[in-house]
Every structure is written in C-alpha cells, then in structure tokens.
Image (cartoon, rainbow, N blue to C red):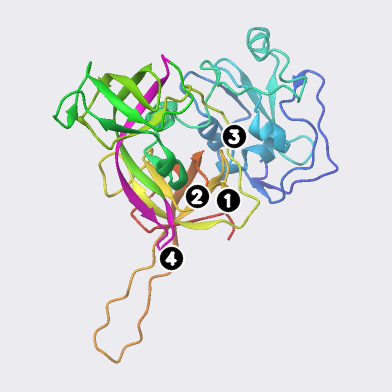
Amino acid sequence: MRPSVFRASLTQRLLPTAIIALGLLQPALADELKLQENAPDRYIVVKGDTLWDISGKFLKDPWKWPQIWNMNKEEIKNPHWIYPGDVIVLDTSGGSPRLRLLGNDKNDALRGNAKLNPRVRVTQFDAQAAPAIPAKAIEPFMAKPLVVDEAEFRAAPRIAQAPTEHLTITTGDKAYAVGVGGGQSGDQWQVYHGGKELRDPDTKEVLGYEVTYVGDAITKATGEVSTLQLSKAVQEVTVGDRLVPRPRKEYNNYVPHTPEANIQGKVLSTYGGVNDAGPYTTVVVNRGQRDGLELGHVLFIYKAPRHIRAENSKEESLMTPPEKIGNLFIYRVFPKLAYGLVLDSTVPVNLLDQVRKPGL
C-alpha cells in the first residue's frame, strides 16, 4: 500500500523521460504532503475542473498544489495551463509524491512555449484551461469592483449635474461630470452609488468604501465639465455618483499557495445578499497589498470566538476556542482590502470571523 504521508526532499529529483514536468526543479515549499486515502494514480482532466478540485483529488491540503508540482514563485503567478483531456500522473517512485503531466500533442500546442520558457508571462486567462477556482463565482467581482480604495474613491470623477432639474438619470440620458481630466470622447465608465465606509474593526482605520454598481456611461465631450451619456442603468443614477474607468476583462489564473507573511485578519463584508456566507460566496477581508496579500493566497477561516454563557456573576468570563471552518481563496487585492472566495466551509461564515495564514 502506498504511504499517505511523504516528506518533501530537496535532493530527490524525478525526471521520467516520457513525462513532461510542469514545474522547474526548484526547492519545494517546506511542509509534509498528505495524500488523500483514495488518491488516484492518474486523473484525466474534464471540462469544469478547477485547479483546486484537481489538487483536492490528490492532496488532503489542496493549497499545497505548488509543492506537489514542485513549482517556483514565478510559476505560481504564471502557471502552465492544464486543459481537459490532460492526464495527470501521481509519481511516488522517488519517495516524494509529485504530479506530472503526460504529453498530449493537442494540449501541448495550446500551451505553446510557456512550459519551455519561464520568462513568458500570460496575463489573460485562457478560457479553455482549468481555472484556479470557479470562474462564474467571481466574474461579477472581477468586472465590477464593489470595494473601492479610499484614495481612489475620493479622487474619482463624479456626476455633477443631470440634463434637467431632476436629480435622477436613466439609460440614454446625458449627464455632466467633473474630474474626468485628460480623457477623450469614447472613454467608458462604470457608475457607482454610495460609499459606505469599511473600517478596520480593531484600529478603526478607514480601509475603503463599499459601493453599489448602478450603470455604465460613455464620454461624449471633454472639458472642465465633461458631457457623458448613460449607456446602461441598472438602478437610478443620481448627482454625486462616482465614475470608475471600465476595467479590461482580465483574469490572472494564479494557483493556490500560502502567504509568506504571517497574515491575520477578519471578514468585513459578505456578498450575494446573505448574512451567512457559504461555499462560493465572496467576502471582503481587512488585509491587502500592504499586508503582503496577493492573488492566489489561501487563508484559513476560523469562527470568531463567542462568549460562554455564565450561570452566575461569579463565573469567569470565557470564550469559545478558535475553530477552523473553511478555506478562503484570495482572487482580487486592493491596497488595504481583498476579495476572497469561500471554499468548502463546514458552517456559515459571518462578519468578524477570523482569517489567517495556514499553520498560524
């Protein structure tokens, strides 16, 4: 029977001639690899698979994907795509488990030179390849940020006047904006309403603003006061709403990996119209780029400590111990905040639940 636990070795290198390795031979991330009890010897990738799903078929800890592939830091940020039809082989012949990719002429052509040249940087996700996490779960938050950095929000252009004395604007209406700056006719904008402050629950620092997407607009003429036309309105647009340049549709497919910094934070907001966030729900955490958080980082989620009900006033005040309830995949990072997708949670995730680097 194959042992389920192997210690990573920096000296063992597996180079089967008939197999194409996805990772360059760099030192593996420290920590042991625990295989699933029923880990297959090989797996054929099917449409709809994610890197997280595939990793979970082999590993008890799916975030250790880079370790079992023996990937370096650049490959984590710029992975070699895995496509439906690829055959992934679990190789334990050297004592350390490694995943290898069998040659596939069709899919090798799709991968092009990326597997041969580590300097190649792919910034646009190939829609045919297996994504890190379910793309449909995060698409609304990639195209329409509902959290805006404080400085960005304060400096954003704003709608300053409606076409009539009415304050509301709808699809097809003109609007007048200030702060557009050196743009040009044809520039596309997203329009956001509100600006609820998101404060750090401990330091009370304003980390950003939570906004509501209300529509799209196009610049028709520029100047100190620019003329826009509202091309789409999903809600009423009003004077004072902010403008954010429409982002390019881009998805960087970073693979799951753990932060180097000892990151600890809390859940500030949940989306999807729910108070109890379950699997594939987006949450906002009070940590961002300045804290060392980056795309693809995996954090553990812990239920926030709760007071133990005392029977009388003489009893000591006690709290429930930390309890891990799920994993969080960070997929969009702002200076002080980040979006994370809840994965395989055992109980609902709520505001002020804790997130931290695995192992802390």
Can you tell which of label 3 and label 4 is closer to the viewer?
4
Q: Is residue 127 above or below residue 211?
A: above
Q: For the residues marked 3 and 4, what is the alpha-carbon distance in whole angstroms?
A: 31 Å
Instruction: Please tell me how crowded label 1 is: few (under 14), some (14-19), or many (20+) other residues with Cα within 10 Å.
Output: few
- When asked about the image quadrant of residue 21, the answer is top right
Q: Is residue 202 above or below residue 72?
A: below
Which mark is first along the chain, 2 or 4?
4
- Residue 343 seen: no
Q: For the residues marked 1 and 4, what is the alpha-carbon distance in whole angstroms?
A: 17 Å
Residue 343 falls inside the magenta stretch: no
Residue tagged 3: 255
Query: Pointers 2 and 1 in contact (CB under 8 A)?
Result: yes
Q: Which range is magenta?
A: 185-207
Circle on res. 202 = 4
- Amino acid on which the number 1 mark rests in the picture: Arg
Residue tagged 1: 290
Q: Is residue 218 above or below residue 37?
A: above
Residue 192 falls inside the magenta stretch: yes
